[in-house]
């Protein structure tokens, strides 16, 4: 192949395919190289299939509570083959949708693996074994991330699984042990718990959801999970996984001493690593920070015309963060001059209850030297949450003390992964608590909790009081 | 086991432990060497309802008497609790994170909130109510509440 492309994008995950679509929209001739299916981790083995599973398991639990809502459902049970089929058909439908979009934007999709031999030359090994070279003007690296493998003895034992295997449920283990109380570990903990597994979570840090989640909310979530019967250990360091008859034994150390727990399956979910090996980056002189590619605010690497986005550049490893970076990089390679505004990147966790946040936590805001006022409102005082029978949780606003400017929004409760969008907008445009409070929110809806929390800034919440 | 003063108001029994001091808001304070343990009175916990969550200011927080030391959340209401003494939070009852409903079960014992490093306990104590004085105040408050029902 000769120089017929303006931009080559390595990796067709949410960052890469969005970059391809946007660059195509801007008139660039784009080639997208993907070794597997488009959509990457997120669409194939991450966000999307897990959300299919959380949707199904929530339905299961709701159906079991049907009598509370005056509906008779004799016995709701999971049907695992159908559950897997629903999950897979959802994924497949979205993958083919992305493929269709790429076609419409005239993006050339190459199936294979690529490495950089020069800043403008890619060596591609096709999925069929064929070798080819692609010359381009710009390269956007979007290789994503891989499951982190901590140095724990016993990691290679059968039935020690990663999130990828955990998605494939042919039977429900009697006892699932989850190593890692972050977003991935806890989402699976809630899915398997709903399907009937006893679940134990082992988190090394002192609170669940380490790395940016409001500490008070993380502690509340731990309490809610424990009250429901989940075993949650924080400050627990896993030492080894070993076979124990037909089960696995996980040894761990916590403040009160050493302990062990046995289960049928162990899910190791301790995070993800940038997938930057084998791309020829070191040879080319692309600067790395550990495994992560170093980029400037326009997402350029230190090598001219080589750009990088998504999980491979580190930071928040989130699909929507990769997507916005994909848009920014696509605009910059086509002559634009854009930077990413990370302040309004929300974080969403599909546990039961859900957790979502955007902007600064109270602790971060204070550490930045801001004088803050924190105001919160519980879903127990929100009529819609009561109707839904999901009144657990709260909305918390972190505001600048004088102006009321919203610095951060932290939520736990029903549909907060949707509700956080309003918080993201508030942070992005620099809205104040008064702006939110004087925006009429429809009644009876969950977003009224946001309005009430905002009223709290002037100590004027109407459906709740602190005495 | 402490001894209690006890009253029944409209079928509710309220107890006041005789071995400690009280703020008029219903927070007890008990000196242990140079530290002071604090918690909710039986009346305050009953009046608040079932505790769902408790957020206590973390160890290290400096407080003046009257500053907010904790917020407890019940089905009915969020209740801001003020410190009866000045000083620094030395220790938070770990049960506040794992089982805060202990406040309802054992307000004068296992349900304590925090241990404070008091900066001037003698001055605080002089301002606080003794058990009998709080008992009288609480009884009046409980009777007022009962009339509203």
Image: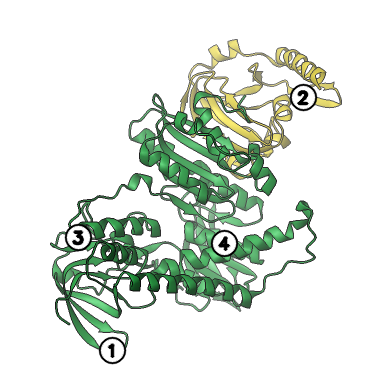
Q: Is residue A4 left or right of residue A246?
A: left
Location of mark 2 (residue):
B15
The quarter of the rendered structure image containing the N terminus of chain A is: bottom left
* Pointer 4 with pointer 1, Cβ within 8 A: no
For the point 59% across and 43% down, the residue is A446
- Chain letter, disc 1 residue: A
Q: Helix, strand or loop at disc 2?
A: strand
Location of mark 1 (residue):
A129
Q: Helix, strand or loop at disc 1?
A: loop
Chain letter for the part of the structure drawn in yellow: B
- Disc with the residue nearer the chain's start (1 vs 3): 1
Q: Can marks 4 and 2 be said to lie on one chain?
A: no
For the point 25% across and 66% down, the residue is A141
**Cα gap from disc 2 to disc 3, whole angstroms:** 75 Å
- Chain letter, disc 3 residue: A
Q: Which mark is residue A189?
A: 4
Of tags 4 and 2, the one toward the viewer is 4
Would residue A162 be seen by someone viewing this image from the given angle?
no
Q: Nearer the viewer, residue A263 or A215?
A: A215
- Chain letter, disc 4 residue: A
Of tags 4 and 1, the one toward the viewer is 1
* Pointer 1 with pointer 3, Cβ within 8 A: no
Of the chain colours in the picture, the one used for chain A is green
Location of mark 3 (residue):
A334
**Cα gap from disc 1 to disc 3, whole angstroms:** 32 Å
* Pointer 4 with pointer 2, Cβ within 8 A: no
């Amino acid at each position: 192949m000769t120089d017929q492309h303006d931009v080559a994008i390595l990796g067709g995950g949410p960052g890469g395919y969005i970059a391809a679509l946007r660059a195509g929209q801007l008139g660039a001739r784009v080639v997208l190289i993907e070794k597997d299916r488009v959509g990457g981790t997120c669409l194939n083995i991450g966000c999307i299939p897990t959300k299919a599973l959380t949707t199904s398991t929530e339905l299961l639990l709701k159906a079991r509570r049907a009598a509370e809502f005056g509906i008779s459902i004799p016995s709701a049970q999971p049907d695992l083959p159908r559950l897997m089929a629903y999950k897979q058909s959802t994924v497949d439908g979205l993958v083919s949708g992305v493929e269709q979009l790429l076609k419409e934007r005239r993006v050339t999709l190459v199936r294979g693996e690529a490495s950089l031999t020069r800043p403008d030359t890619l060596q591609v090994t096709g999925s069929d074994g064929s070798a080819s070279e692609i010359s381009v003007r710009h390269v956007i690296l979007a290789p994503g991330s891989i499951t982190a493998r901590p140095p724990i003895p016993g990691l290679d034992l059968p039935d020690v699984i990663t999130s990828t295997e955990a998605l494939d449920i042919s039977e429900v283990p009697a006892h699932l042990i989850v190593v890692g109380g972050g977003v991935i570990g806890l989402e699976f903990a809630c899915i398997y718990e709903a399907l009937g597994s006893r679940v134990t979570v082992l988190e090394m840090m002192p609170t669940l959801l380490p790395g940016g989640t409001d500490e008070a909310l993380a502690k509340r979530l731990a309490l809610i999970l424990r009250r429901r019967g989940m075993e949650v250990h924080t400050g627990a360091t896993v030492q080894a996984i070993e076979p124990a008859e037909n089960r696995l034994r996980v040894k761990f150390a916590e403040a009160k001493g050493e302990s062990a727990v046995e289960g049928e399956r162990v899910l190791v979910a301790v995070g993800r690593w940038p997938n930057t090996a084998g791309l020829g980056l070191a040879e080319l002189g692309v600067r790395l920070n550990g495994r992560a590619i170093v980029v400037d605010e326009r997402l350029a690497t230190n090598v001219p015309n080589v750009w990088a986005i998504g999980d491979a550049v580190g930071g928040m490893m989130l699909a929507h963060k990769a997507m916005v970076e994909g848009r920014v990089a696509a605009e910059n390679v086509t002559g634009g001059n854009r930077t990413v505004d990370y302040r309004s990147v929300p974080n969403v966790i599909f546990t039961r209850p859900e957790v979502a946040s955007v902007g600064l936590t109270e602790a971060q805001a204070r550490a930045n030297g801001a004088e803050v006022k924190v105001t919160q409102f519980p879903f127990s005082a929100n009529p819609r949450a009561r109707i839904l029978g999901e009144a657990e949780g709260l909305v918390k606003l972190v505001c600048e003390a004088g102006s009321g400017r919203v610095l951060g929004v932290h939520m736990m409760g029903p549909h907060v992964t949707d509700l956080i969008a309003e918080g993201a907008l508030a942070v992005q445009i620099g809205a104040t608590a008064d702006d939110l409070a004087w925006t009429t929110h429809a009644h009876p809806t969950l977003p009224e909790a946001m309005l009430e929390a905002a009223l709290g800034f002037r100590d004027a919440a109407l459906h709740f009081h602190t005495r | 086991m402490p001894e209690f003063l006890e009253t029944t108001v409209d079928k509710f029994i309220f107890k006041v432990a005789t071995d400690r001091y009280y703020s008029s808001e219903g927070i007890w304070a008990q000196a242990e060497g140079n530290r002071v343990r604090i918690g909710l009175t039986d009346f305050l916990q009953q009046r608040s309802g079932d505790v769902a969550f408790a957020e206590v200011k973390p160890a290290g927080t400096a407080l003046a008497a009257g500053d907010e030391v904790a917020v407890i959340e019940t089905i009915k209401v969020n209740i801001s609790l003020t410190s009866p003494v000045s000083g620094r939070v030395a220790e938070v009852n770990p049960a506040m994170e794992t089982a805060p409903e202990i406040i309802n079960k054992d307000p004068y014992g296992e349900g304590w909130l925090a241990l404070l490093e008091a900066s001037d306990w003698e001055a605080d104590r002089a301002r606080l109510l003794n058990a009998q004085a709080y008992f009288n105040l609480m009884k009046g408050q409980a009777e007022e509440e009962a009339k509203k029902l």
